[in-house]
Amino acid sequence: MNILILGSGGREHAFAWKIKQSTSCERLYVAPGNAGTAQIAENVSILLDDFTAIAQLCIEKKIDLVVVGPEAPLVNGIIDFFQQQPALQAVQIIGTSQAGAQLEGSKDFAKRFMQEQAIPTAQYATFTVAQYDAAIAYVEKHPLPIVLKADGLAAGKGVIICDTHTEAKEILKEMLLEEKFGVASQKVVIEQFLSGIELSVFILTDGKHYKILPSAKDYKRIGEGDTGLNTGGMGAISPVSFADAAFMQKVEAKIVQPTLKGLQAAQINYKGFLFIGLMKVGDEPYVIEYNVRMGDPETQVVLPRIQTDLVTLLQATAQQTLDKTPLTVEEQTATTVVLVSGGYPEAYEKGKVIEGLAQVKESIVFHAGTAYHNEKLVTNGGRVLAITSLGKSMDEALQASRKVAEQIQFEGKYYRKDIGADLQEV
Ligand code: AMP
Ligand code: GLY
């Protein structure tokens, strides 16, 4: 089969790495890709919002299977677009329709969906600009802390947790009246604060059946001890020690099954990955958010633990035969440590030469923001590389990742040395 992966991050390099191992994979393309995907696939320079160019590429390269990495093309309706093109009917594409992508694209939609399906989540209310006065009155009576969420996509920055009513009212004003996050904050979800420990659960569904993939925990803040600004993710581990069998049974019964039932009831075409961000409060799971894609950097620990041929799983997803496809998972622990550019997640420089990759033997180096410049590997983004290692214990895997993180050099390199540290005590 000829396969096309859309995206350019560490997640997409991990997809390419895993798909490349399949005996069913003939030609592999990544659009636009990065320096890591260029080593194992052919990169194609295409903008992900240019569906016509993506369609042409599929026809030209005789693509059989498309994997959509990030959420934006799904939220913009790439699945619906493919379905409407007569020339693309034979192309299998993994992802949800635009209707399903609202689970990530609109927090208000996701909250209403959960309420309708009685899925455990924080209590909330949604307000538009026209309801500004009511929103202020709601905030004034709300217990602290108060969680404010821009309804639409806001590049991971649209959630603000406020410790005082004054702060909450100020942020609410900025969001609703001053369009702090543009159109994304024309509607705001005001939510109860949940106190607990977070984890990410991943589902692959063909619309009728599903597989629960290995769960993972990611580390979102830039600083050690989970301090400082939010990032795309500084590291991840899988499995998650506190997500034991009893807890995962609750997740399946109270969250996964009602979610998929709700999608079916709404006749939403969903053949793809669903990422459920959960908070474990006491022993109970609550949904913090849905994403209609895999996580980054969680994919870099989830895929290395999947032993089943990924192309087989993806084909079964497209053909709605996931019930007949067994999933086998590696028992070892996987960890990934992300190396970022100095300054990230604020302003940072690009084009720094990266050295030391050739010496890496036992870990897998997934590229994110990398490029080739004058035949040299250079930094090309905030998150640069993700170092994934497998080990019999989390400690063993982490030691391996940290050793490589130390060996690889580029000016301004930064990484968190405490990935997984919180789990030592749980
Ligand atoms: P989101 O963009 O929805 O993933 O939110 C970003 C982060 O904000 C989450 O990963 C949580 O750490 C935090 N968060 C979101 N909603 C809540 C909530 N209701 N209670 C506590 N923390 C939350
Ligand atoms: N690592 C979190 C995300 O992919 O959204």
Image (cartoon, helix red, strand yellow):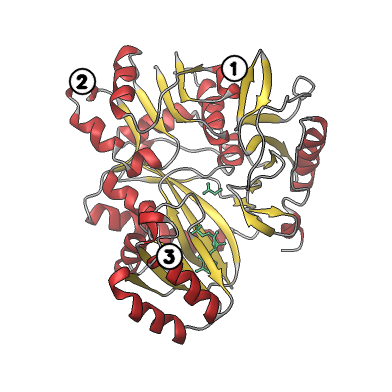
The secondary element bearing badge 3 is classed as helix
Residue 39 visible to the viewer: yes
Q: Which mark is residue 87?
A: 2
Report whether 307 appears left or right of 61.
Answer: right
Residue matched to label 3: 175
Q: Which of 282 and 376 is in front in this view?
A: 376
Image location of residue 344, percent across then percent down = 66, 45
Q: Nearer the viewer, mark 1 or mark 3?
A: 3
Q: How many marks?
A: 3
Residue matched to label 1: 39
Cβ of mark 3 under 8 Å from ligand 1: the answer is no
Image location of residue 402, percent across then percent down = 79, 40
Q: How packed is label 1: few (under 14 Cα within 10 Å), some, or many (20 or more)? A: few
Lower sequence index among marks 3 and 2: 2
Lower sequence index among marks 1 and 2: 1
Q: In which quarter of the image is residue 357?
A: top right
Image location of residue 374, percent across then percent down = 66, 13
Report whether 263 appears left or right of 401.
Answer: left
Up/down of 422 relative to 309, above or below: below
Image quadrant where one finds the N terminus: top left
State how far apart marks 3 and 2 are (Cα): 43 Å
Q: Name the amino acid type tagged 2.
A: Ala
Q: How packed is label 3: few (under 14 Cα within 10 Å), some, or many (20 or more)? A: many
Report whether 101 appears left or right of 357.
Answer: left
Q: In which quarter of the image is residue 25?
A: top left
Q: Nearer the viewer, residue 192 or 322?
A: 192
Lower sequence index among marks 1 and 3: 1
State how far apart marks 1 and 2 are (Cα): 30 Å
Q: Residue most toward the front?
A: 178
The secondary element bearing badge 2 is classed as helix
Cβ of mark 1 under 8 Å from ligand 2: the answer is no
The structure residue drawn at horizontal position 29% and vertical position 36%, both measured from the top left corner, is 79
